[in-house]
Image: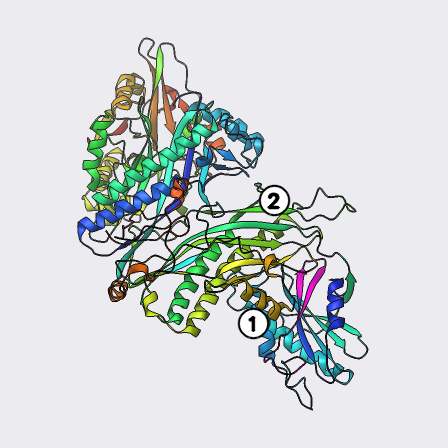
Amino acid sequence: MVVGNIILRLRGSLEFKCQLDSTDVPHVQKVISRTFEALGSQVKAESLVLSLSSSPVFLWPNKGGHATAGEISPNRPCKDLQQLIQTDDQESSRKKSAKKDKNNPTAGIINLTLMTEVTEPGVLSAPTLLRGSKKHHLLQTTLPMDCVVSVLSSESISVVCGTLVGALCSQLGDMEKVALRHMKGTALLIPQPFHFLLPAPVGLVTVVYPAGVPDSQLETQRKELHSLFELPDDRPYLRRANALHFPDEPYKDGYLRNPHVHLNHPALENGKPYLVQGVYSYHHYMQDRVDDNGWGCAYRSLQTICSWFQQQGYVERAVPSHKEIQQALVEVGDKQGSFLGSRQWIGSIEVAAVLDQLLGVTSKIMFVSQGSELASKGRELANHFLSEGTPIMIGGGVLAHTILGVAWSETTGQIRYLILDPHYTGAEDLQVITDKGWCGWKGPEFWDQNAYYNLCLPQRPKTI
Amino acid sequence: MGRGYIVEDVVEKYLSNLSVPGASCVTGLLIGQSSSQRDFVVLAVRTPQKDTEGQGSPSVSRGAGNSLERLDVEWVTEHARQVSRMLPGGMSVIGVFLVTPPELSKEAQNTLRRLIFAVDKHISKGRLWSLTEEDVTEKVTLHICSKTRKVVCRTYDVRDPKSSAKPADWKYQSGVCTSWPLLTCSVGLNLVFPVLEMHVLPQDMEKCMKEGLQTWAKQIEDGLCLINGDAMPGEVELLGGQKKNAKAVQQTFRAQILIPMAEPQSERRLTASVKVCSGSLTLKGMVQCRAYLHSNKPRAKHATEVIKRDVINTVSSRVEMFLEDLLMEGEDKGSVGVQQVLPRRVFAPVPGMSLCVCDYMFPDECVSDVSDRLKEMLDWETPEDSIDTSQEAVPEAPTIDLKNTVVQKNLKAKSTLDARPKTPSEDPTEAHKSHKTYYAGVAMAAAIALLATGTSLIYLSD
């Protein structure tokens, strides 16, 4: 993200309503296009108002950025808008945002909502009533507008307003293309915008996908975009699950995401950290009302890995429960029927089998005969995180853990392991989890030096 | 502790000047505003004559016997409903009065009770906005003895059918409403209601419009209101700056109403909804809105409430009137596909006060009709030149939807197109183009130019 930039996000609903006199395709397409054109005019009308969330400020972007609050004039830099946003707890949010800024480039977003002024003088005469008697199909829906722009914080409000209106218009254009492309008869699939944070220099892009069409059927569209943005063609960037998660929208499922980003990484001489790429959820003992204390650690590590594949867009399947995991193992013949409902442990081999059965993911298995050998696996582990970037499940002795990264020095051989511990039984308290080391960096002494270990290294499928 | 009614001096004058011949009774309405602390009455209007012959209140038939029993409650309530339509926001019918000879004074209370409940029920019919917790539901009844001129003032809570009379204070004062703040705004409408089954019967149209207007009214009710360009928190006092004994001056406030452009989908829909319709109703144009607040520490939230209610009332009143007219005149088949002008709002000053009332003028009416109506409904003379008809402009001649086959037939039957009453003018304002059609498809009629700023039409096909 560019430093010195502010992100503004404009959301709202636009009413899409059109009358189809006939259902033949050229007519339908013409009417749909005309309706989008009319919405474009609506968005450029003087009656358009943007409401600055959590503040009493309203802006009229098509009136030069005129605002309600007296102290905001259209020539002021848009960063002044941030000062007017009222947060519940000013103190703590400032502290949090300072820390967030270094890790999350979308902190400090200005949210705006679409509104219209019904009292804006336009048509000046008394009302009339027109009765139309033509038979027609009435198509009606609301379009979920969601535009994000990144502007210099010194840019004036009037210019930023113009940029936002421009973004709305171009989003309407994208929506029209998607609507027409996927339309069948009179069934109009609702176009939905998704935001993606692509690697530099591309940055923030918004893509519109038709509702109800699964990612698997949108490969052509993604291929076009991958080539447009010059993205590698072997890993997903633009699946719906890859959509950018804004910091002000809490995850509804309650799991913590990427607790490791809040840690300080060890500084090794001539060494650097090699970490998991993307987003995973922290799964551990006692979650989902399952009391698996003492036996479920490998299951939880497997869940963490599944959550990674889901959130990177490789699978649409939800994270499997203990039951589903056991069922899968019975199905592949790895376990007998009596396994179901039991509290039997599983190991790396079983984890790999389940990943294959339920997610279609293959894994490499690494075996060390003694825990002390792990200290020499720096290069291999680093390479894994560089090329695959998936979380690793490690089982040995009587414990299972998840390795999220490794810090390794080629010259000194020093090594540290970033461990996510599934044995945690408490609540989703980030402070406790990071302070007490449930997610933390460990040294080679962490492993049982005499026990043998198996590691499951899941491989990314080569797909977009 | 009962309510206290502060009443304009002119009301006292009016009531004492009422001619009440012999043993007859006179009914009438009390108009004003109620706030949580205090109530204000600014007008009293007798129930008008049912027929032009005879004296006394026509709501009572002449002859001996107990005239109270023959009171035409329906007539009183209908008068109340018509008068309500003439009141801008903030003002409403808050009570009834009854003048009786002394021997009927005892029964008068019962009659007043019947009247006030019936009046409130009738004027609340068809209301598109809802009362809130803060609305005052106490209405006042005033009994005046025709001989002694003694006044008995009681209130009833019209929300509770079993409520009993509570005593209230009735105090006359001058200049009650001279400093009542005025709120104004003009609201643009562009509403399209689908008609699932197209009949031309007014009842079907009414149902369709009612449903559509209900949704629109909810949007207005839930919308945000800015006062003089400011989004004030509800508790802020509107007249905060004024000193207590400062010269009473009426302030005008400009209201702006903001609503979300559309309501987000509530269900998890994947496709647009498709309805097969046999027609549509399009309501387009601009309505002028006015509302008054009282001067007893009014707050921003009251201001937003009264102006929003006026917006909703003015639209629903005109539509009601239009449909009532249609019902009376009978259905004109040729009017389908033709844009019809709804009655437009005109304002008239209340004599001796800085308030206005309003009325609605049908396209074929003129100012003298309004003046006559004001005399009949509100019992006062209004010089024609004081009636302000300029607030809402007359739309240009209605254009014809040439695609409509019924209209085409009619046109073929007519010899020339000069049957149209006025010639449409050119489109004078380029600048307003952006405010016009929301539907970009505009068909060009062969010989008829499109309309000016007034009204935009929707053409439905290519």
Characterize the local packing of mark 2: few (<14), some (14-19) or many (20 or more) Cα atoms within 10 angstroms: few
User: From which residue to which does the magenta span run?
Assistant: B31-57
Residue sitting at x 31%, y 42%: A37
Position of B148 with respect to B356 (left or right) is right
In the depicted view, which residue is nearer to us: A228 or B459? B459
How did the renderer colour the structure? rainbow
Q: Is residue B54 above or below residue A447?
A: below
Residue A319 in sight here: no
**Which chain is indicated by disc 2?**
B
Where residue B60 sits: x, y (%)? 64, 83
Residue A57 in sight here: yes
Where residue B125 sits: x, y (%)? 53, 69
Report the residue that reaches farthest toward the right: B148
Q: Any mark on residue B233, and which?
A: 2
Find out whether residue B311 is within the magenta segment.
no
Position of B175 with respect to A420 (left or right) is right
Task: Give residue A347's quadrant in the image.
Answer: top left
Residue sitting at x 41%, y 31%: A162
Residue where numbered disc 1 is placed:
B122
